[in-house]
Structures are given as structure tokens and as C-alpha cells.
Image: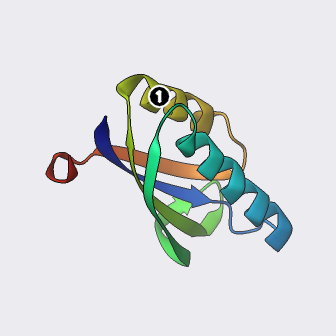
């Protein structure tokens, strides 16, 4: 398994319950498929560098995890079609292998 880092920006207009549900779904998605979540850091609401679909802030969550490349492709596919996710970025961390 290889080390990855995933930064997810959730829509800041979500209610507290919807935000908790979206975070739980994302955590379950990352943890499925034999992956191991090392750490989840909730950064909270931060200002975006630029406006995205008239949204100026985002709710940031950073995941550090180990997974197989096949599962990483599935995470990417699901996050692309998730409505509560404004943007996400996943990178491989060779320094944490």
C-alpha cells in the first residue's frame, strides 16, 4: 500500500448535520477497500483562493491514509460526483511510505 494525502473542500453552506454526514461518508469511502486512515484533520472554514460557483469559503478536511492504487481511483471517481464536495485534491506521499 502507498501513502496518500487527500484534501477535501466541502460546501460551507451545509447544516451541521449535513456536514457531519458528508464527513462520515468521505471517511467511510477513504477507509473502505482495505485502506488504512492514519489521520483526519478538520481545518474548518477557510477563505478560498478564488470564488468557485459563487462560493467564497470552504470547509476543509485533510486525510492522510495508505491505500492500493485501485482504491484511489474509486475514491477519485466517487468524490467527482458528490454534490457536497466543492473541490478535492489527492497526492501520493512518497516520504510517508
Q: How is the image coloured?
A: rainbow
| Foreground pick, 63 / 85 | 63
Density class for disc 1 (Cα within 10 Å; few <14, some 14-19, many ≥20) is some
| Foreground pick, 64 / 82 | 64
Please provide percent x and percent y for residue 90: 39, 45
Q: Which residue is mark 1?
A: 71
Question: Position of 39 compared to 11: left or right?
Answer: left
Question: Position of 22 compared to 15: left or right?
Answer: left
Q: Residue at x 53, y 67 (%)?
A: 60
* 50 lies above or below 86: below
| Foreground pick, 38 / 92 | 38
* 46 lies above or below 6: below
Q: Residue at x 66, y 61 (%)?
A: 54
Q: Secondary structure at mark 1?
A: helix
**Quarter of the view holding residue 45:** bottom right
Q: Quick one: which residue is furthest to the top in this view?
A: 70
* 28 lies above or below 59: above
Please provide percent x and percent y for residue 65: 40, 50
Q: Residue at x 55, y 59 (%)?
A: 9
**Quarter of the view holding residue 39:** bottom left
| Foreground pick, 33 / 60 | 33
Amino acid at each position: 500500500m502507498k501513502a496518500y494525502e487527500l484534501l477535501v473542500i466541502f460546501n460551507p453552506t451545509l447544516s451541521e448535520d449535513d456536514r457531519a454526514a458528508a464527513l462520515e461518508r468521505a471517511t467511510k469511502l477513504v477507509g473502505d477497500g482495505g485502506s488504512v486512515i492514519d489521520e483526519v484533520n478538520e481545518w474548518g472554514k477557510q477563505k478560498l483562493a478564488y470564488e468557485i460557483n459563487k462560493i467564497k469559503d470552504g470547509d476543509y478536511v485533510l486525510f492522510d491514509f495508505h491505500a492500493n492504487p485501485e482504491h484511489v481511483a474509486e475514491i477519485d471517481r466517487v468524490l467527482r460526483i458528490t454534490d457536497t464536495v466543492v473541490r478535492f485534491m489527492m497526492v501520493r506521499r512518497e516520504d510517508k511510505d
